[in-house]
Image (tube, grey):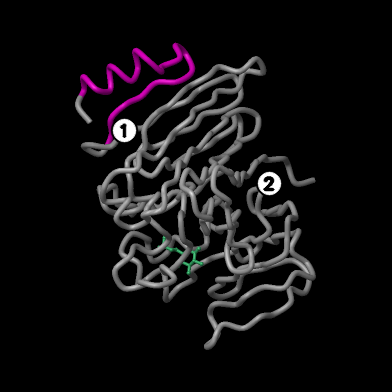
């Protein structure tokens, strides 16, 4: 995007003292938000929330120091939007991008708002360009609303604008900053069934107690609408993830060997992050009738661990 285009975005959608658009990493553009509650950065590439930090807190979202910022690559960290499929494409895993195309595409700004409670809101839309239609021919509209305040709320709404039912999977693939993942407990999933994707073949298991990480973890918990909390004694805080429109949750940490295999993930970064993802996957893929919408949302907040 050129400087003139960024100036035009600021003239139309900037909120003096709260939201401004700026270029970074060459052609990338972000909305930088600073209000009475928090700061945040949202990249238009992928509608990617890259940072959220309530005043007086450490960063809530984790970002790899090795993330690529390239047109056809996802950003490693923050909140990638996986849509309209999660993981491998169900029919064409070799040619279609892993986790769908929404995180690889450039989104447009639709609206910005300063809310009465001091929060700042940004609405983005994914334009249905020819390359995306080639990958997903059924007509759709996709919007992301990000609300930055005392909490961070991210809401993705899909409208089926075609005339046949549409099936899609989604993830708000959220990377959280933790002090030491081996000391973290994720609560809210006790007793839930999950698909362990690391066994061959993937096996259904039942979660006993809190989720802890002492090796690679890659699990899709099903039939759960529960709020999850990440208890992080090293950072002395609890991160709460409440969700709407989601009956599945993915927990992921790549651990040592997978970190080494990923070119955009530092070999020693895995102890500082955990993904707790608000998703529609496995038994929770969504079938949307013509003209209907489906909204999946996560509300993230932080409190001291007492
Ligand atoms: C998780 C998957 O949601 O995303 C993992 O469960 C995957 O299997 C991870 O490795 C990261 O995916 P990507 O495409 O961003 O490297």
Instruction: Determine if the magenta segment contains residue 19.
Output: yes
In the image, farthest residue toward the bottom? 200
Q: Secondary structure at mark 2?
A: strand
How far across and down, in percent of the image, does residue 250 sit? 59, 63
How far across and down, in percent of the image, does residue 252 sit? 55, 65
Q: Residues within 10 Å of mark 1 (few under 14, many from 20)?
A: many
Q: Kindly identify the residue that appears in the image at 39 percent across and 50 percent down.
A: 103
Q: Kindly identify the residue that appears in the image at 53 percent across and 34 percent down.
A: 145
Give 107 or 167, whichever is nearer the viewer.
167
Q: Which residue is mark 2?
A: 244
Q: Is residue 71 left or right of residue 43?
A: left
Q: Specify whether residue 27 is in view.
A: yes
Q: How many marks?
A: 2
Q: Quadrant of residue 260?
A: bottom left
Q: Is residue 173 left or right of residue 70?
A: right
Q: Which residue is mark 1?
A: 29
């Amino acid at each position: 995007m050129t400087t003139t285009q960024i100036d035009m975005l600021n003239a139309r959608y900037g909120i003096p003292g709260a939201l401004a658009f700026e270029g970074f990493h060459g052609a990338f553009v972000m909305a930088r938000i600073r209000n009475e509650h928090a700061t945040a950065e949202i990249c238009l590439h992928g509608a990617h929330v890259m940072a959220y930090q309530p005043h007086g807190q450490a960063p809530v979202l984790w970002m790899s120091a090795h993330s690529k910022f390239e047109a056809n690559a996802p950003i490693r960290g923050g909140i990638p939007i996986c849509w309209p499929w999660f993981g491998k494409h169900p029919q064409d895993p070799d040619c279609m991008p892993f986790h769908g195309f929404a995180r690889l595409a450039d989104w447009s700004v639709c609206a910005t708002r300063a809310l009465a409670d001091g929060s700042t809101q940004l609405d983005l839309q994914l334009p249905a360009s020819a390359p995306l239609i080639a990958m997903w021919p059924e007509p759709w509209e996709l919007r992301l609303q990000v609300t930055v305040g005392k909490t961070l709320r991210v809401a993705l709404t899909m409208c089926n604008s075609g005339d046949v039912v549409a099936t899609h999977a989604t993830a708000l693939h959220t990377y959280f900053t933790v002090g030491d993942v081996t000391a973290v407990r994720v609560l809210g999933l006790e007793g839930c069934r999950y698909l362990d994707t690391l066994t061959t073949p993937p096996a259904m298991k039942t979660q006993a107690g809190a989720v802890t990480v002492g090796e690679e973890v890659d699990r899709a918990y099903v039939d759960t609408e529960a709020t999850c909390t990440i208890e992080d004694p090293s950072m002395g805080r609890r991160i709460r993830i409440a969700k709407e429109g989601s009956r599945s949750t993915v927990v992921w940490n790549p651990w040592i060997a997978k970190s080494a295999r990923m070119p955009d993930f530092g070999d020693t970064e895995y102890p500082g992050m955990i993904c707790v993802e608000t998703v529609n996957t496995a038994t929770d893929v969504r079938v949307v009738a013509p003209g209907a919408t489906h909204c999946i949302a996560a509300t993230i907040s932080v409190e001291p661990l007492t």
